[in-house]
């Protein structure tokens, strides 16, 4: 048996171990006494909190309400579906005269999952009612975001199964992706799709012909989702059901919504509270609750809980009654489950969600993975265990997967399965070449640097603009005189540049004044303010909120990090690049794929604000600056 593929999977597992250990170490550092105050400021922790009522929700989960009683104005990172742990202080070790974070911490040995969160109130699902008393009686209670142990366990288990596979489809796919086995194709005449462009049509045909693997490579604005939806729709003419996955809930919902719009019956597997409002009706839980048998099942479940609450636990009759009720509940669950899956043509979930108990034992001829360039390879193998063939869609020149361990990143954990297949099986790749978002001048730089100049603008967007004789893409140097005081600051968590923030907003004000208030509001011209640094984003949000000039436009202005703008677009994009130092250190900005995302969000106007002297130490930013200067000269 060829060993190279198994060694590659083994390497992935070792790198994943490094990432896991790194995350555990970070978590330990954050949750030590000296780290709690820092964690609160980073939005990773609420401390102290008070508990509210506890109850069973409509999903039969036991939940508890929490409220933070300090630092209410701080932004936080708690979201539905995220795992959390609880801690309290050792009363004997706390100095009453000390700070709120004095004293030894004691962590509870169970974990919860965020069910709902808004500003200063949170609802957390617990393992059961027995742990609620411990929380409600705790002194100086806190809640902290925890490591996603479940996803790590699923990735490790998936890699182990892939390494052990000696035959069957899992072994085949491993050898195709990492070994010497060639991928195969069906042979048939190309189908016509007049509503698609030529490269989209070719991509759909390549998907339909693939026996093993195909890739839809979709650069910004090229209609990747449109192409993928068409490929799924056509596949369903040949197969009864497909599995559609992505790394994030947002990406899953986006593709699922588009399929639902085409009239495809979608069953969305996952936490309903992490699903968009439009997809709620398609979730497994909502469909389960609306099934005719559900009322009977709920009554039986309540009866079982009531019986357990009785004090006659030693009674044989009681145990027999509980056993009969459990058996009937199981029968009803199986019947409802079969009905739901028989009705669905598309099963949609995250990659980790494909291990949901509702999908145990299920196999699919085709697995579609959207935003595959943002997914770790081990996460892809969770879903690949259920698949006969796989179609990956995304763009490996945009946001990469998140890897926190530098050692794991340097070892190659950040290299995705999509990248591997693009390099090893280029014949399986279809590049979408016509983009429908950007003015030609905005698109051209990205096309030349990242896509070998192969992108073309659709005629309807090629010359789109806001003002006559405008330059679609400009760079404003924040320090043209070369002053030493460049304004870059760090607080140990992120970077900001107050001087540049002021310049950024002044530049935006002048541009909005050129357009005119009446036109902006009438045409709803929308604006995106982007910075790679969270510290600068927070600063810009505060400044815009306090500046009366922006009051009429605030509903049209979005301010976020590059990651926060992934998949979005705006008429006007302004990027504050922050870095300004004599050494030419650009840190985070050296991730060029992230900058590719930032500069391709703009439809008609892109404004770059940054210190030319610092940034142009990098060949990429030097070329970008020269490109904008060339556009300026062409306009003069």
Image (cartoon, grey):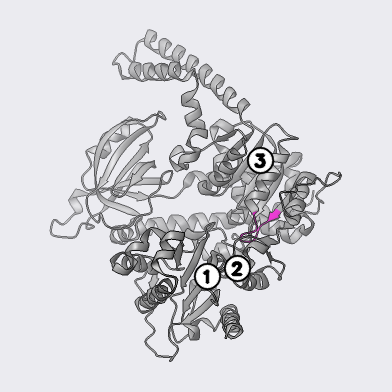
Say whether residue 209 is left or right of residue 142. right
Residue corresponding to mark 2:
439
- Report whether residue 4 is seen: no
Span highlighted in magenta in the image: 216-223
Q: Nearer the viewer, mark 1 or mark 3?
A: 1
Front residue of this view, candidates 534 and 521: 521
Q: Position of residue 279 (x, y in %)?
A: 50, 39
Majority secondary structure of magenta residues? loop
Q: Decide: marks 1, 3 in contact (CB < 8 A)?
A: no
According to the picture, the residue beneath numbered tag 1 turns out to be 605
| Mark 1 and mark 2 residues within 8 Å of each other at the beta carbon | yes
Report x, y in % for residue 295: 43, 18
Relative depth, front residue between 604 and 312: 604
Taking the view exactly as shown, the residue that stands out farthest to the left is 97
- Closer-to-camera residue (344/70): 344
Q: Which residue is mark 3?
A: 385
Q: Residues within 10 Å of mark 3 (few under 14, many from 20)?
A: many
């Amino acid at each position: 048996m060829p060993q190279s593929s198994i060694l590659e999977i083994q390497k992935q597992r070792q790198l994943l171990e490094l990432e896991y250990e790194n995350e555990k170490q970070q978590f330990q550092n954050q949750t030590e006494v000296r780290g709690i105050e820092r964690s609160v400021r980073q939005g990773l922790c609420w401390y102290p909190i008070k508990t509210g009522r506890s109850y069973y929700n409509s999903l039969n989960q036991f939940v508890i309400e929490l409220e933070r009683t300090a630092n209410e104005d701080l932004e936080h990172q708690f979201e539905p579906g995220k795992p959390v742990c609880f801690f309290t202080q050792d009363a004997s070790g706390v100095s009453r005269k000390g700070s709120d974070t004095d004293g030894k911490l004691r962590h509870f040995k169970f974990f919860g999952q965020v069910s709902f969160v808004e500003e200063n109130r949170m609802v957390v699902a617990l393992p059961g009612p027995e742990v609620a008393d411990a929380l409600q009686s705790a002194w100086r209670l806190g809640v902290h975001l925890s490591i996603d142990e479940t996803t790590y366990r699923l990735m490790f288990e998936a890699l182990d199964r892939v390494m052990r596979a000696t035959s069957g489809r899992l072994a085949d796919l491993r050898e195709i992706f990492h070994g010497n086995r060639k991928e195969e194709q069906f042979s048939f005449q190309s189908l016509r799709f007049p509503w698609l462009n030529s490269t989209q049509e070719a991509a759909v045909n390549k998907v339909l012909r693939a026996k093993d693997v195909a890739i839809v490579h979709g650069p910004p604005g090229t209609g990747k989702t449109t192409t993928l939806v068409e490929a799924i729709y056509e596949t369903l003419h040949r197969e009864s059901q497909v599995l559609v996955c992505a790394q994030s809930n947002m990406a899953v919902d986006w593709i699922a919504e588009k399929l639902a719009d085409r009239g495809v019956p979608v069953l969305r597997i996952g936490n309903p509270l992490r699903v968009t409002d439009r997809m709620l009706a398609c979730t497994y839980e909502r469909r389960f609750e609306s099934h005719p048998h559900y009322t009977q099942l709920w009554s039986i479940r309540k009866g079982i809980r009531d019986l357990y609450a009785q004090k006659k636990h030693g009674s044989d009759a009681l145990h027999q009654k509980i056993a009969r009720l459990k058996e009937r509940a199981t029968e009803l669950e199986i019947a409802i489950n079969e009905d739901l899956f028989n009705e669905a043509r598309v099963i949609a979930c995250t990659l980790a969600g494909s291990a949901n108990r509702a999908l145990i034992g299920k196999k699919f001829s085709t697995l579609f993975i959207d935003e595959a360039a943002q997914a770790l390879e081990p996460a892809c193998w969770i879903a690949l265990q259920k698949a006969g063939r796989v179609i990956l869609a995304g763009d490996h020149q945009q946001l990469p997967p998140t890897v926190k361990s530098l050692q794991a990143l340097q070892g190659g954990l950040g290299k995705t399965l999509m990248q591997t297949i693009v390099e090893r099986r280029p014949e399986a790749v279809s590049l979408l070449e016509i983009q429908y978002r950007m003015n030609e001048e905005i698109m051209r730089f990205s096309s030349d640097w990242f896509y070998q100049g192969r992108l073309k603008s659709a005629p309807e967007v090629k010359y789109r603009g806001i003002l006559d004789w405008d330059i679609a893409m400009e760079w404003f140097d924040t320090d043209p005189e070369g002053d030493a005081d460049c304004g870059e600051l760090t607080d140990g968590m992120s970077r900001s540049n107050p001087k540049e923030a002021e310049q950024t907003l002044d530049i935006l004000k002048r541009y909005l004044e050129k357009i005119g208030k009446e036109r902006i509001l009438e045409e709803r011209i929308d604006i995106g303010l982007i910075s790679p640094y969270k510290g600068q984003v927070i600063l810009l949000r505060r400044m815009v909120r306090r500046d009366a000039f922006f009051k009429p436009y605030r509903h049209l202005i979005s301010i976020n990090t590059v990651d926060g703008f992934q998949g979005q677009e705006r008429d006007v994009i302004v990027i504050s690049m922050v870095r300004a130092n004599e050494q030419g250190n650009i840190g985070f900005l050296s991730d060029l794929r992230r900058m590719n995302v930032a500069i391709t969000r703009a439809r008609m106007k892109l404004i770059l604000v940054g210190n030319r002297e610092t940034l142009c130490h990098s060949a990429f930013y030097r070329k970008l600056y020269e490109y904008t200067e060339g556009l300026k000269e062409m306009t003069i």
